[in-house]
């Protein structure tokens, strides 16, 4: 099974991936951007937010995604549990908010990059404005986080739209619950699927 943990910056994705993966010792734990050699270089470029063109930024994320699908997802999707920190859903959501690329093109370009290989389940960790601002205040912000909480909250809504546009299953979880409560909700959902 290929699952993606989605959410805006500081929603608790890494925390949950660490906890959930303890229950799947053979799982492939991966992320976008930056899981492959080329992806690591792309990650540095995009997080410094140097691209003047939003289209260039989108295409860099898409190049990272194509490499990730080819190197990490496709070789493992048949027989391994894959747990990914972000996915094409983030790609579509961030680009929806930029507004420079037509929705239909966004989806088609992602189909092209991914060979239509997508997560079977997308878990969205949903933050409140207060919790987001508190968590941002506790860390050194990268170029994208410096765009601010209003921007990130729009992305959170766009994640829901992106999941629908891609036709994927979305499970929303309140990211202000305790770490253990969130982990249990994710595991219950995954296990419910595998016993059906
Ligand atoms: N359920 C929770 N309750 C309170 N704090 C939490 C919870 N989950 C994570 N945190 C804290 O919030 C901060 C961000 O968590 P984490 O790094 O897991 O988020 P992230 O979504 O991976 O962030 P980013 O996208 O910025 O890398 C950390 O300080 C973490 O300890
Ligand atoms: C996949 C993807 C990501 N982003 C943004 C989202 C975050 O601000 C960063 C990634 O940082 P993280 O610490 O790994 O969460 O990149 C984006 O704008 N477009 C994308 O396709």
Image: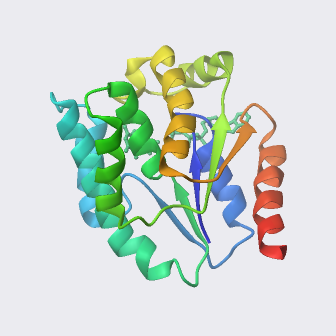
From the viewer's side, name the closer residue of 88 and 17.
88
- Residue 113: x, y in percent? 30, 60
Percent of width and height locating residue 6: 57, 45
Left or right, 153 with respect to 45, comes to right
Q: Is residue 127 shown left or right of residue 68?
A: right
- Is residue 165 shown to the viewer in this render? yes
Task: Give the quarter the ligand 2 occupies.
Answer: top left
Image quadrant holding the C terminus, namely bottom right
Q: Is residue 70 above or below residue 111?
A: below
Quarter of the image holding residue 188? bottom right
Point out the image quarter for the N terminus.
Answer: bottom right
State whether residue 62 is above or below residue 190. above
Determine the residue located farthest toward the bottom in the rendered image. 79
What is the residue that sits farthest to the front in this orientation?
Answer: 104
* Number of marks in the rendered image: 0
The answer to whether residue 86 shows anywhere in this view is no
Q: Where is residue 64 shown, x and y percent of the image?
A: 29, 56
| Residue shown at the point (68%, 22%) measured from the top left | 128
Counting from the top left corner in percent of width and height, residue 158 is at 50, 31
């Amino acid at each position: 099974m290929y699952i993606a943990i989605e959410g805006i910056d500081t929603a608790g994705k890494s925390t949950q991936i660490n906890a959930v993966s303890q229950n799947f010792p053979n799982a492939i734990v991966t992320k976008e951007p930056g899981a492959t050699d080329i992806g690591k270089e792309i990650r540095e470029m995009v997080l410094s937010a140097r691209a003047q063109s939003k289209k260039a930024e989108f295409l860099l994320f898409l190049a990272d995604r194509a490499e990730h699908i080819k190197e990490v997802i496709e070789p493992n999707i048949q027989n391994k549990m894959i747990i990914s920190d972000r996915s094409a859903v983030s790609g579509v959501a961030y680009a929806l908010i930029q507004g420079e690329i037509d929705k239909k093109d966004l989806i088609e370009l992602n189909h092209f990059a991914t060979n239509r290989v997508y997560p079977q389940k997308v878990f969205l960790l949903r933050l409140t404005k207060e919790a987001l601002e508190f968590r941002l205040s506790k860390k050194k912000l990268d170029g994208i986080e410096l765009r601010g909480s209003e921007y990130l909250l729009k992305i959170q809504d766009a994640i829901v739209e992106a999941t629908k546009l891609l036709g994927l299953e979305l499970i929303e979880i309140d990211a202000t619950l305790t770490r253990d409560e969130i982990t249990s909700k994710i595991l219950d959902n995954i296990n419910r699927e595998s016993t059906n």
